[in-house]
Image: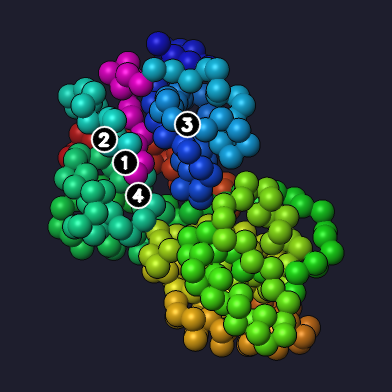
Amino acid sequence: MFGLFKKSPAQKSILFYRDLTEYTGGQQKVMDYFSHLRTVPEFCVDIAFSAATRWDSCNPWFPEYQSTAVNYVPAHYDYAFVAGMDWLVYLPLRPEGQPVINLIQHVRHADPAHPLCEFLTEPAVRICVSREVADAIRSTGRVNGPVVVIDNGLAIPNIPTQQKQYPLFIFGPKNPAVAQELTDLIRAQGKDVYCIDHWLPRLDLLHTLAASRISLLLPSATEGFYLPALESMRYSELTIVPDCVGNRSFCRNRENCLFPEYNSAALMSAVKEAMEIIEQPAKLNTFKQHCESTLAYHSLARERDEFLKLMQQLDTLWEQM
């Protein structure tokens, strides 16, 4: 019944599910929550994967779980953990009364035109990765169950100090058209820019950020949080990231980043400002100090502690629903 780890009578068991065809911050965050539960003896954690799941370095569960994943049978477990469209697989198999932890990572869950919104009426204890996400889903009036905010945490690998190869790096797989437009405009001004408009394995992206003086990140128009902004604050000298709703609680304009409106004119203006700031060591150092404070709060350890505290209360919360 259980996969890599065998359940003891004193443990509670919990089942995850993933359909993973490319690496995203959302997939990484599910992996983080999976890993949080593995750090304590109270829980036995298993995960099932779709047949289409990709097994290579883009998969955070590779290679450990490639041969040890289990069949998706929620009835064999005390709890289920679902995120995104996992509901489609879970609902036909849902045992009556099973407590569900639902990770909500995007404000689009509140959009009545999006399929994710339909699942808000399903009973679950919902973890939102930012206050903006929690406010969005509460505003629908459809949420069935408690809503808890656990601000995203991030594990920051140690990368050796690198030579800054790129004066300006644009990362735009979520908006390749704007990434190319900005690249063309900047090059027309005779300035050097390195643009990537496709997905990279996470470690490759981090090395590129570390090799960049200024990093301009292009999220989707709306996000639930947008983890690459924190990664850029750690590795690049200066970060530009536009407003995408879910990053408002931690992206502070002219403190830890430049935070323009999400349009080409505002982004180009931010690039001009960044190029001026980057040549002012005292001003740049102030940005770096604010980045360190932001990163200290958004630690994976703080996220783990808040989640494990919630898990200790899960049965009580479920009984009160």
Check residue 104 in the rendering and tell me which mark sits there, or answer none.
Answer: 4
Q: Which amino acid type corresponds to the residue marked 3 in the rendered image?
A: Thr
The 10 Å Cα crowd at callout 1, few under 14, some 14 to 19, many 20 or more, is few
Q: Nearer the viewer, residue 94 or 19?
A: 19
Marks 4 and 3: which is nearer the front? 3
For image coordinates 23% across by 59% down, the residue present is 111
Which one is earlier in the sequence, the residue at label 1 or at label 4?
Answer: 1
Q: Which amino acid type corresponds to the residue marked 2 in the rendered image?
A: Leu
Q: Secondary structure at mark 4?
A: strand
Q: Is residue 84 magenta?
A: yes
Q: Secondary structure at mark 2?
A: helix
Image coords of residue 258 (percent x, y): 57, 79
Quadrant of the frame with the N terminus: top left
The stretch in magenta equals 72-85
Q: Which amino acid type corresponds to the residue marked 1 in the rendered image?
A: Met
Check residue 85 in the rendering and tell me which mark sits there, or answer none.
Answer: 1
Q: Which residue is mark 2?
A: 88
**Marks 1,2: beta carbons within 8 A:** yes
Image coords of residue 105 (percent x, y): 39, 52
Which one is earlier in the sequence, the residue at label 3 or at label 2?
Answer: 3
For image coordinates 52% across by 17% down, the residue present is 68
Drawn side of residue 262 relative to residue 241, left or right: left
Check residue 53 in the rendering and tell me which mark sits there, or answer none.
Answer: 3
